[in-house]
Structure formats: C-alpha cells, structure tokens
Amino acid sequence: MSQSIRLRVARYRPDKDTEPGWQEYDVPLREEWTVLDGLNHVKNEVDTTLSFRWSCRMGICGSCGMNVGGEPRLTCATFLSDYAPGPVDVAPLSNFPVVRDLVVDITDFMEKLPRVKPWLIRDEEQPVDEGEYLQSPEELDAYKQFSMCINCMLCYAACPVYGLEPEFIGPAAIALAERYDLDSRDHGTRQRLDVLIEQEGVYGCTFVGECTRVCPKHVDPAAAIQRYKLKAAQESVKMFLLPRALRR
Ligand code: FES
C-alpha cells in the first residue's frame, strides 16, 4: 500500500459565515511531491472548495507562500517528505488579513512598495538623448542578489516588528529600495533615504533577522536595513557639519 501523509489545513470561508478552523486531508507521500502538490491533490481529488494561490511551481512567481509546520515557506519548494510521518500544518501567512482559507490580502505591501520608488531614477542633469546607460558585469553583481526578490511575503510573515507595528514599511520594500540604490544607473538614493528614515522606515527594525533567514531567494533584507541606518547616520553627520542656513 502506498504511503500517505496527513495535512492539517487551516480553513476560513467568510462568505459561508464559518469560523476559522482546521480540516485534515490524507495525501499520497511521494518523494518528489511538494506541499503544493499535496494541496493540488486535495483540490483536484478530494475537496474543490479549498482556496490557495500558486502559479509557476518553480519558486519564481512568489504566489504560493504559506505557513508550513509553523514556518513561512514557498509550498512549491517544500517537500512533503521533510515532514514525514506527519501530520503537517498548512496555514496562511501570518501578519496579513486572510481572504479565504490559505489566501491572504497583501494590499498593504502593494501600497507601501511605491513609496521607495522601485524603479530606475535618471540623473536629471544627463540629457535623455545621450544614449543608454552602460553597465559592467561587476556593476550588475553589486545589486543582483537584491533583484532576486519575488515579493513572496515570507519575510513579512516572519517579521515580528511588522506583526506588532503594521505601519513598518517592511523587509521586502527595503530590500527592493536597496536593489535600485546599488544599481549604477540609478540616481534616486537620496529620495529613497528620505522615505526610509521616516518613523515607519528602517528605524522600526530591531534586527531580529528572521526576514533574511526565511527568504527563499537568499536576499538579505536585514543587511540592507543596517546599511540604510548607516547611510542615514552619515547623512546626519554631514548635515551638522554644514552651516545652519544650508541644512535641509
Ligand atoms: Fe510560483 Fe511557488 S508557485 S513560487
């Protein structure tokens, strides 16, 4: 007889006026199956009412993040066999409102992200018709790791500061600010720093480091946050060295 593993899945269906609770499903325990495969087995073969997000199944789109065994994980990159003999709990990501079952509402992040201007900001002094910005492989290496962020929200689910202070702009937004600040073609560092030194910015972080630990793409938001704190301190020192009339 083939082996199985029990999934304890968090259910919440506000449209049916039901209370949040847990539902158990036994799914085949196959070596190559991920937690997402188990959920898709439930959806396709057992219970079509179960709701969850996924798209690429390759750790690229960032949509399949859930709490698996109490840890934020990409379910398409998490193997069921790591939790054998089970059971394993599958719940929505922490720190976000639950829309239904395993689906969370990430509107808060989507509204915060544009504040750090996650795009290239041109040097206004440089004429537009001067051609493209050239970049060396070394300059690409400087920001490449930060460009790996897939907005999966695992770092927000793991961040105790965001859990307690939802105003905190959060790890991925700061990591994406760093991605553009480290880009040799960008001239927006000052504008981003002005946002990140606000009360909800980098100073909210207490350097727990969970964001970096859970990141499936090995981005390091905790390091970006520390660098912004250093940049902010250097800018303040520079400002106090200026005559008072020239300070901004
Ligand atoms: Fe795309 Fe998991 S389904 S990252």
Image (spheres, rainbow, N blue to C red):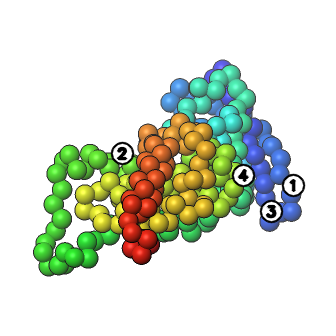
**Would residue 184 be found to the left or right of residue 72 on screen?**
left
Q: Nearer the viewer, mark 2 or mark 1?
A: 2
- Give the secondary structure at mark 1: loop
Q: Which mark is residue 14?
A: 3
Q: Hey, what amino acid is under mark 3? A: Pro
Q: Hey, what amino acid is under mark 2? A: Gln
First-in-chain label (1 vs 3): 3
First-in-chain label (3 vs 2): 3
Q: Which residue matches tag 4?
A: 164
- Label 2 to label 1, Cα distance in Å? 41 Å
- Which residue appears at 50% of the width and 61% of the height? 196
Q: Hey, what amino acid is under mark 1? A: Glu
First-in-chain label (2 vs 1): 1
- Label 1 to label 3, Cα distance in Å? 8 Å
Asked whether the residues under the numbered discs 4 and 1 touch, taking CB atoms below 8 Å apart as contact, a structural biologist would say no
Q: Nearer the viewer, mark 3 or mark 2?
A: 2
Q: Which residue matches tag 1?
A: 19
Mark 4 is surrounded, within 10 Å at the Cα level, by few (under 14), some (14 to 19) or many (20 or more) other residues, namely few
Mark 3 is surrounded, within 10 Å at the Cα level, by few (under 14), some (14 to 19) or many (20 or more) other residues, namely few
- Label 3 to label 2, Cα distance in Å? 39 Å
Quadrant for residue 245, please give it: bottom left
Q: Which residue matches tag 2?
A: 145
First-in-chain label (4 vs 3): 3
